[in-house]
Amino acid sequence: MEKLLRLYLLVATLLLAFNGHSHASAAEQYKTWIPNTNWNNGENWASGRVPCPLQDVQLGNPQNSSPLSIALTGQNALKSLSLPMNGELIFHKDAELTFYQDREVVLDKCTAKGNIQFIASVPKMWYNPNNWKVTDNDGNPVLNDANAIIHLEKVPCQHDQVLFPKDSSFNVASTKPITVASLTINGKSYSQSSFKEFLSGDSGAMQFHLSISSMQLTGQICNDPKGCLCNTNQEKTTICNHVTCVVPLCNDPLEPIGSCCTYCGAVMMVKPGASFRLEDFKSKILSLKAKFKPVSLAEKNGVELAI
């Protein structure tokens, strides 16, 4: 089938869509996992911030007894620590836990006392598009896709390189098979056999709730300048179950290819020529950012670029 270039005009926003997953460029791009179970992440605590020096830290959750892996970095002060029956604390780099009593600590801005509960005990789903972003191999964002509307393209597909950031711990789950090109966790690149071994161990089993046979690492990134096929409608129902749509304020909204929602706008289709190079086209479109605010880079039966 011929590949088609689709242009969606969404109100004042342009969405450019192509039937091809992004060809690997000079600047390597990764689909990077966002959530973590890090001690130093305020979102993982019931109070919305990390513990203060005079607080009693509760890592065990009476409503969820599943073992957790929790990563620490830097210096962390607390009064006492209540551990669950099962789990692990991973001390990265110069991580320290210092226990204080009231008479020993000089309080600065963090003056809270009493119990503080760690709450990141519920696994985050692999096929939730809100759990992913596009970065370089150091985890730095390469594109602002905070308002991305091509949901299927936010989740890693068979040609994607997947990155779980360094100095972190995770709580990931999937009930469906996963196929990606490569997988890097905490700076270590895994092969099919080494990831299977990791999942078989205590730490891997705490962080990745997957069956050993569900993860396939192909080692094949996209080498076609015109792009490669990515997530299809086979994954759409699973992905869209995690998306909440806003009702569009028009009579005949459209549903962009790869999106879970409908939008007000129009669509124009263009067929690229034999010399078409997806990365070159993206670069030209992104050069217009002085006129159009970039929204997202994503793919459908290929790739979609929203600006």
Image: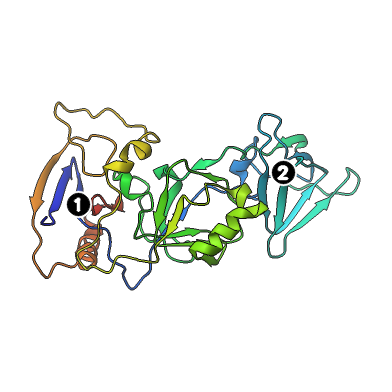
The residue labelled by disc 2 is 51
Q: Callout 2, which amino acid? A: Pro
**Which residue is the extreme one toward the bottom?**
26
The residue labelled by disc 1 is 17
Q: Is residue 39 visible?
A: no
Q: Relative to 58, does residue 231 appear above or below in the rendering?
A: below
Q: Is residue 258 visible?
A: yes
Q: Quadrant of residue 123?
A: top right
Question: Label 2 vs label 1: CA separation?
Answer: 45 Å
Q: Nearer the viewer, residue 273 or 112?
A: 273
Label 1 sits on a secondary structure element that is strand
Residue at the (70%, 56%) spot, across then down: 90
Residue at the (39%, 63%) spot, across then down: 218
Q: Quadrant of residue 233?
A: top left
Q: Relative to 199, does residue 218 appear above or below in the rendering?
A: below
Quarter occupied by the N terminus: bottom left
In the image, 243: left or right of 299? right
Q: Residues within 10 Å of mark 2 (few under 14, many from 20)?
A: many
Q: Callout 1, which amino acid? A: Ala
